[in-house]
Amino acid sequence: MVKKEIRVVGIDDSPFNKFKDKNILVVGVVMRGGSWVDGILSTKVGVDGDDATKKLIGMINKCKFKPQLQCIFLDGIAVAGFNVVDVQELSKKTKLPVIIIIRKWPNIENIKKTLVKINKKQKIKLIEKAGNVIQIDDIFVQLTGIDLEEARKILKVVCTRSLIPEPIRLAHLIAQGVVFGESKGRA
Amino acid sequence: MVKKEIRVVGIDDSPFNKFKDKNILVVGVVMRGGSWVDGILSTKVGVDGDDATKKLIGMINKCKFKPQLQCIFLDGIAVAGFNVVDVQELSKKTKLPVIIIIRKWPNIENIKKTLVKINKKQKIKLIEKAGNVIQIDDIFVQLTGIDLEEARKILKVVCTRSLIPEPIRLAHLIAQGVVFGESKGRA
């Protein structure tokens, strides 16, 4: 049984110019269920860098909501381009399950080819460690530290307004709105 | 009759260091009523500057939600210290009513004294133009382009979660979370 007031955090990165920006804003939205916003977190990560896992662990573990948090949602496995998150490490160090939300079926082979091309081959392992891509209704997920049945129950509570968990939708709007001056929407 | 889905924007500024920061982030949250976030806006204004009115008019008038917007909420009459908003100008140029939300009864005399002291005497006029401070339940408001009865009705719709209109509460959390790395909360 998943409580309607379950505390979760949804994380998304901001848009950036890959020729100009070095560090970009990542936003975390802490919600109770899919409606009440408890707080906003943020950090900065390097474009195509290797610091996302460490930065997200720090952002989550030091926040005052940590004792109540029950689940982390990520909008894709990477932030700031190819700053790929080690989800097993993120889950282990925060002691929280991680649900990666994927809007479109990912072309894993293409991603791997690009990583080889840009000399980031070691990140392929991180992508493989994130587990199988599973379809739930009209979105896809990768699960770490949580089984499919439990993930479905949590998604039912947090997807109040769209197919996307509300904290991810809000993190996306905020990151865009702060950087562009106006959010362009998506979900 | 105020629709439950009335589109409003709530605006708040970010915390800053008055000895260090020149321009600071101001966040606008566009909501339908008091629950659904439609979009996030932002701009930057000068600390103790004179550009708030112009910047807010620009932020609101150019946003895609403008045709649907029915009311502007400000968290106090000034942003970024003493960057006082000319609410009559804001209301006129956006063609929208403005409701200033005040959490504690303001000591207008002290504010005026400070403005004289820091050589910003001309801003006293702007404060006087914003109209009387009126208590509604446990908060205070100043109204421009809207009467008390109508303001009460809109407040009833948008104060879903606290005494403060939800778009103001969220703008506050976002501005804090983005600048500090974690929102401290308030409302």
Image (spheres, coloured by chain):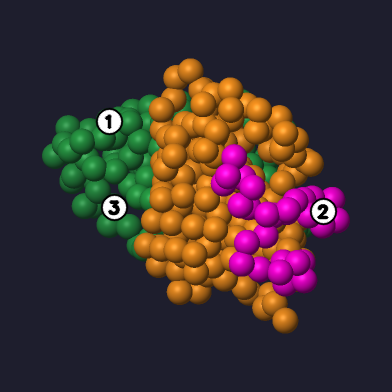
Chain colours: A green, B orange
Instruction: Answer yes or no: are tags 2 and 1 on the same subunit.
Output: no
What residue sits right under mark 2 in the picture?
B135
Alpha-carbon neighbours of circle 3 within 10 Å: few (<14), some, or many (≥20)? few
- Indicate left or right for A40 with B4 as reference: left
The count of marks equals 3
- Decide which of B110, A113 is in the foreground and name it: B110
Question: How far, Cα to Cα, is label 3 from label 2?
Answer: 59 Å
Q: Pick whichever, B54 or A35, lies toward us.
A: B54
Q: Are marks 3 and 1 in contact (CB under 8 Å)?
A: no
CA–CA distance between discs 2 and 1? 48 Å
- Frontmost of labels 3 and 2 is 2
Query: Are tags 3 and 1 found on a single chain?
Result: yes
Residue bearing the label numbered 3 = A108
The residue mark sitting in front, 2 or 1, is 2
Q: Is residue B20 above or below residue A90?
A: above
Please tell me whether mark 1 sits on a helix, a strand or a loop.
loop
- Verify whether residue B162 appears in magenta: no
Q: Tell whether label 2 touches label 3 (CB within 8 Å).
A: no
Query: Residue at 52% across / 38% down in the picture?
Result: B122
Type of residue at label 1? Lys
Residue B75 in percent (x, y) is at 63, 47
